[in-house]
Image (cartoon, grey):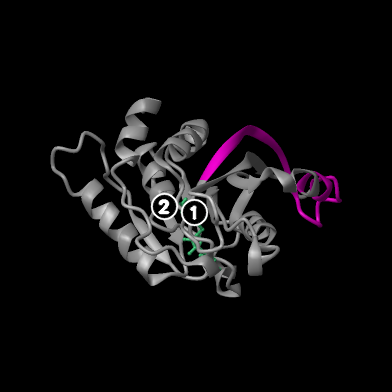
Amino acid sequence: MKLKELESWLSQCDQFDKPKVVLEQYATSAHVAARMIYSAQENLTDAAVCDLGSGCGILSIGSILAGAAYVCGFEVDEDAIEIAIGNCDEMFDDSENPVNFVNTEIDIRSDALSPALERFSSCFDVIIMNPPFGTKNNAGADYKFLKQAIHLVRPEGHIYSLHKSSTREFFKKKMALPIEKLGVTGNVLAQIRYDLPKCYKFHKEKSVDIAVDFWHFQKQSKP
Ligand SMILES: C[S@@+](CC[C@H](N)C(=O)[O-])C[C@H]1O[C@@H](n2cnc3c(N)ncnc32)[C@H](O)[C@@H]1O
């Protein structure tokens, strides 16, 4: 699918009604989501995909539009799940929809960091996510999401993820460790100016513009 077409479809997705600060709920814009999906497209075709912290489902929906066979979104917040399901209904029930959705399904489950996800270990071809950045009371959440993603993706599988640029050196150091410590290679595909709307009281400006890295990681096979 062409980038413009993808963005146009994704711009129809509803976003959080009342974003929850503890969960770091800021939706990926259609502009950013479309570019993430477009970059991942070759690996998304026919893939089993996981969206960790799926929120209102924009990355799950985008993955299906790009040809994924199956997407499983993990999201802890019921309200977000309700919006995501509404977005899927809007997007996929229209009989005039030009996209073929045969054999596609979005399955939204709960806590992305739960040990119960053990059973999904190495299950997915691709993980696509915009995890909490690990700010405020949530320090380290971004790294926990990455480690869970590595656990869930199959060897040689792909992880596409957004992380604050200020953590770039931290991730690079972790990747330089022996394989059993983290077990991925990765590189930054693009640096994005991420416009966080003023959704929280502690934001003084109308929106906060932060630098965010769009990472592509690949899980290493054990020798
Ligand atoms: C930055 S938002 C991104 C939402 C969505 N993926 C998007 O791209 O618009 C992070 C999401 O992670 C969810 N979240 C935070 N902690 C979580 C956890 N432990 N398990 C599952 N979801 C979580 C939040 O509720 C929120 O929807």
Residue at 36% in and 33% down: 6
Element class at badge 2: strand
What residue is shown with label 1?
Answer: 50
Residue at 50% in and 37% down: 36
Residue 168: horizontal and vertical position, in percent? 74, 43
Identify which amino acid the numbered label 2 is placed on: Val
Instruction: Decide: is 108 above or below 69.
Output: below
Query: Dots 1 and 2: beta carbons under 8 Å?
Result: yes
Identify which amino acid the numbered label 1 is placed on: Cys
* Mark positioned earlier in the residue sequence (1 or 2): 1
What residue is shown with label 2?
Answer: 71
Query: Residue 121 in magenta?
Result: no
Residue at 80% in and 44% down: 169
Residues 118 and 172: in front is 172
Q: Which mark is residue 124?
A: none
Residues 107 and 4: in front is 4
Residue 26 falls left or right of residue 183: left
Residue 24: horizontal and vertical position, in percent? 54, 61
Residues 199 and 118: in front is 199
Pick out the residue farthest to the front: 204
State which region is magenta.
Answer: 171-195
How crowded pointer 2 is (Cα within 10 Å; few <14, some 14-19, many 20+) is rated as many
